[in-house]
Amino acid sequence: MRHIKLRDLEVSRIGLGAMGMSHGYSDSGTDEAESIRTLHRALELGVTLIDTAEIYGPYTNEELVGRALKGRRDQVVLATKFGMVAHSGAGPWNLDSSPANIRTSVEGSLKRLGTDRIDLYYQHRVDPNVPIEETAGAVGELIGEGKVRAFGLSEAGPDTIRRAHAVHPVSAVQSEYSLWTRGLEERVLPVLRELNIGLVPFSPLGHGFLTGTVRSTADFKEGDFRHGNPRFTGENFQRNLRIADEVQAVAEQAGATPAQVALAWLLSQGDDIAPIPGTKRVHRVEENSAADGIQLTGAQIDTLSSLPPAAGETHPEGARQMLER
């Protein structure tokens, strides 16, 4: 597995998102043993960037990752996130990036993860009630104390990124980016490259859509992120199937799977990009990791880059209000 740098933080070219092992999908949390095997297999394949968050579960995903990494901590660049649990009383799914809340969050994450430091600590969503300068300063203090190694932002817009970076260097911005979610290319990506900030795309496979395996929404349960998601409903779903079919066609040309092609396209967009496809199954982490060795032709990259935008918004209205894109 090749490595790149997110500013000064060296990571594997492809990481692993752990969220779905505990949270977000119809069968999340149903097979902890397989999830742990998947994390261990990822390490064997050279994956070093492991991503979680306190809100996943809440808390249970960090606990799972902590158990899986016991005795293996030094093999990974461990990323987690704060700011979507208000510990002073409002609880989960309430934004709070105040310095006091960050202090509470980091201590909980360190304990659940069974570690003395977090390698990459992201603000999960921008808190409109707390100046980003205060948040950046608080994380900077944690870095000074050795509890955190690097500061990240998630789904932040250009102005927030610049203001945070002026207080403490931002190593990475995590945002949804894939063949069917490309809005950050115009506004955010140029700022990241100007400031030497790495990009960590989450949902690089379109919540499974770009793998070609999602042909019906009948099996999505109420707690599944995709249940009621605009891109997975009605006419939008049918239109988006055609995008998946185009990815499948390129995959057949390349002798690869659609997932590998979607990831290889992302990797072709720059040496400052480290996607974190999520999975809870060993065979999928093997498939995804192998995308590092896929070389698309210029014509194949052009074909993929010219695919039409996905139909429908990436999130329902309530969740979309938390995004700065």
Image: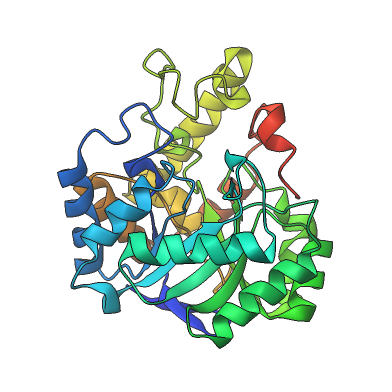
In the image, residue 325 above or below residue 108: above
Residue found at x 44% / y 17%: 217
Res 295 seen here: no
Please give left or right for residue 120 compared with residue 34 in the image: right
Please give left or right for residue 109 compared with residue 198 in the image: left
- The residue nearer to you, when weighing 316 against 182, is 316
Residue found at x 41% / y 76%: 117
Give residue 44's position: percent from left, percent from top. Answer: 19, 68
Question: If the image is split into quadrants, where does the N terminus sit?
Answer: bottom left
Give residue 261's position: percent from left, percent from top. Answer: 42, 50
Residue found at x 44% / y 26%: 224
Give residue 77's position: percent from left, percent from top. Answer: 39, 73
Give residue 86's position: percent from left, percent from top. Answer: 61, 48
In the image, residue 23 above or below residue 13: above
Please give left or right for residue 25 compared with residue 307 in the image: left
Res 212 seen here: yes
In the image, residue 267 above or below residue 11: above
Residue 276 occupies quadrant? bottom left
